[in-house]
Amino acid sequence: MSSGSIFIVHSDKDLNVALEIAQMLKKAGAEVWIESLNLKNIDPDQDEVELVEKAILSSGLVAIVASKNALSDDWVKDQKGLAKDNGKSLFVVKAGPCDLSKKLRWRSIPMVDFQSDKNAAIAALLDAAGVAPVEVKQETPELETTPAEPASKQSIEVAEEVKEDKQSSSEEAALLADLKDDFEFYKFKLKQQIKNSRFNKILGVSIGAVLVAVAIFIPEFVEAIEGMQDKIQWAGGFVGGGLPTTFSGLNLNSEKVNKERLRGVQTFERRLNRMERGQISFTKNDIFALEDEFQIYIDA
């Protein structure tokens, strides 16, 4: 990508508005990089994340489509963080209701409101990227009329093929829907485990605080504990995870692991979303392969 190129960061839920921004920028003469177009039909041996990283680092401007969806999207946060850490110029394009004034990591970035004035927003992005806008001449295409012809054998065969394609598409859509349900169920279980880990961590710290308080105000308790030290150490081998310090530490580690796994699910979700939107060509076998990869990820 050139120094005047624009990389567009967006949530999958904001794809339509992101594509609209990309198309307007391209018509104005800008070089644009956006996942839904630039990752379409890439070679199987290419790593999507590496391609995204390379595009961000070689871009002249990183435009972030901001909305409620984007604020809670970890993939958006990762791309934004990579761009910021590497000194890339950032520009926020407000494309939905969201209050950025109270967001510390967002409020310092220049912003334009695409909702209120699309042309002004595009002009601001072009200016920030150092791209001189190109005027697009609108030409009225000449309409050609052709006489209607009776349906041929070939057209009938094409219609039959279309019918078969629709049936196949319905089956693939059902498989994708089932796989998406699997993703959601696994995410639900991870979130429940994260919630339980937080509760147990707080419980462990609370128990520790109570024991310290008792030890301070009741000297006899300290003497009793000292007398039971050997027994506590022996029991710790069986219930060490339940002792306050270890208890809270284990749950903290568990919470971190589950958060990382939750972020990992997003990689599978992005691939599935691209299949659903037709951004990449796929077959039933590709869906089954994605399902197998996800099962391996769960079992790991």
Image (cartoon, rainbow, N blue to C red):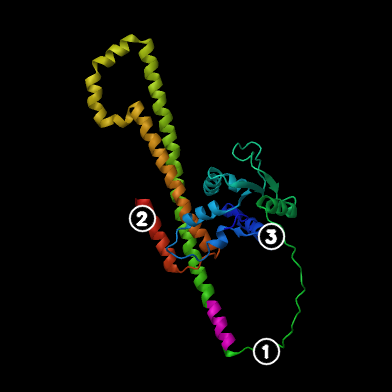
Which residue is identified by label 2? Answer: 296
Q: Amino acid at mark 3?
A: Met
N-terminal of the pair, mark 2 or mark 1, is: 1
Locate residue 195 relative to residue 237 in the image: left or right: right
Viewer-side label of 1, 3 = 3
- State yes or no: discs 2 and 1 in contact (Cβ < 8 Å): no
CA distance for labels 2 and 3: 42 Å
Viewer-side label of 2, 3 = 3
- Badge 3: residue crowd in 10 Å (few <14, some 14–19, many ≥20): some
Image height of 36 relative to 261, above or below:
below
| Circle count | 3
Element marked by disc 3: helix
- Badge 1: residue crowd in 10 Å (few <14, some 14–19, many ≥20): few
Residue 171, image x, y percentages: 48, 68
Q: Nearer the viewer, residue 222 or 259?
A: 259
Which residue is identified by label 1? Answer: 149
Q: Amino acid at mark 2?
A: Ile
Which residue is identified by label 3? Answer: 24
Residue 95 visible, this angle:
no
CA distance for labels 2 and 1: 55 Å
CA distance for labels 1 and 3: 39 Å
Locate residue 34 relative to residue 242 in the image: left or right: right
N-terminal of the pair, mark 2 or mark 3, is: 3
Q: Nearer the viewer, residue 212 or 26?
A: 26
Q: Amino acid at mark 1?
A: Glu
Identity of the residue drawn at 28% across and 30% down: 239
Element marked by disc 2: helix
Whether residue 160 appears in magenta in the rendering, the answer is yes
Q: Which stretch did the figure color magenta?
A: 154-163
